[in-house]
Amino acid sequence: MAGFFRKLFGNKKESVKQKQIDMTITAPLLDQKINSIIANQNVKYGVKQLVAGVGQSVGKQREHNEDSVLALTSTIAGSAENVPFGLYIVADGMGGHQFGEVASNAAIRIMGGNITKKFHSYLYNLPTQTLQDSLQEVMEASIMEAHQYVQREAPGSGTTVTAALVLGDQVTIAHVGDSRAYSIYLDGRIEPITRDHSLVKRLEELGHLSKEQAVSFPHRNVLIRALGQGESLEADIFTIPFPNSSILMICSDGLWGVISENDIIRIVTEAPNLHRACHNLVEAANVAGGPDNITVILAQLIG
């Protein structure tokens, strides 16, 4: 009988030990602690990885959202070399055009689906062969398929696309329109990665407008290139190293057209983490009037 009760209730010492384990209390890290961990660039991490945040709002003056966003982040590590992988896309459907939201959503889904399908075997199966196409070829084929789909299924519409494919410590950009990618450095600098395909930017490059005049140019939203517009699409596609000690930002003009670069730097560097930084950027654009849809992605490579 004694043996039966020991089996039923267990040894008293084991029960006390289990009780002690059950009483263990865990608590989430405070934002300040998380921020100090992320900001400490001297810490050496065993696994290089991506962290990312996303923010979006319809804004204060629009009835529906024509922005679309996709953010995928993955890190695979083990006995082999670790592979940080990220795919980040912002698309801004052309305002005033029928099916603008359809165009932007189709762009991120087609590009996202094609690119992740291409990398699925490379990332998630035992590697037996390398990629047959270059990263730039993968991006070009994906953006062209999205362009053809929008032309066919939503004629008269269009969208910007700014996409970043992160593999290891390299970033491949595919860009058309006036959504933007930036590098925000932790020392207080901000540098554009992409160039706007807009009328105002072209006039500025030709010397017909100063940078100050461009800010108040009445037709500053007119694009000279957009996905879904025109028979052929000429996208900017290039590969750069992921900038050291920096944060990659991709956003629609509902953000960069409303908040100054100095305010963007301040908001991002003062936030405790990337998720809070995205929230604060969107909130700042809305406080400034929110004239357009607002979308932002922040990504950082740690390790």
Image (cartoon, rainbow, N blue to C red):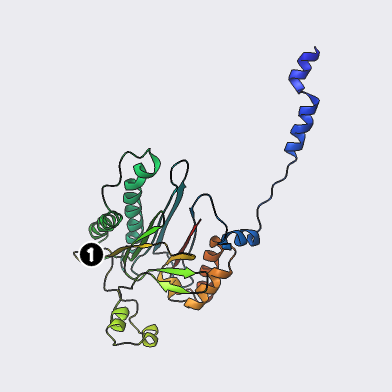
At 23% from the left and 64% from the top, the residue drawn is 233
In this rendering, the answer to whether 265 lies above or below 113 is below
Percent x, y for residue 299? 47, 60
Vertical side of 23 occupied by 98: above or below: below
Going 32% across and 58% down the picture, which residue do you hit? 107
Image x and y of residue 68, in percent: 40, 60
Q: Position of residue 65 (x, y in %)?
A: 42, 64
Query: Can residue 266 be seen at all in this image of the molecule?
Result: yes
Disc 1 residue type (three-letter): Leu
Q: Nearer the viewer, residue 159 or 140?
A: 140
Q: Residues within 10 Å of mark 1 (few under 14, many from 20)?
A: some
In percent of the image, x 26 and y 59: which residue is there?
147
Is residue 189 found left or right of 117 in the rendered image? right
* Residue pointed to by mark 1: 233
- Front-most of residues 3 and 127: 127
Quarter-of-image position of residue 2: top right
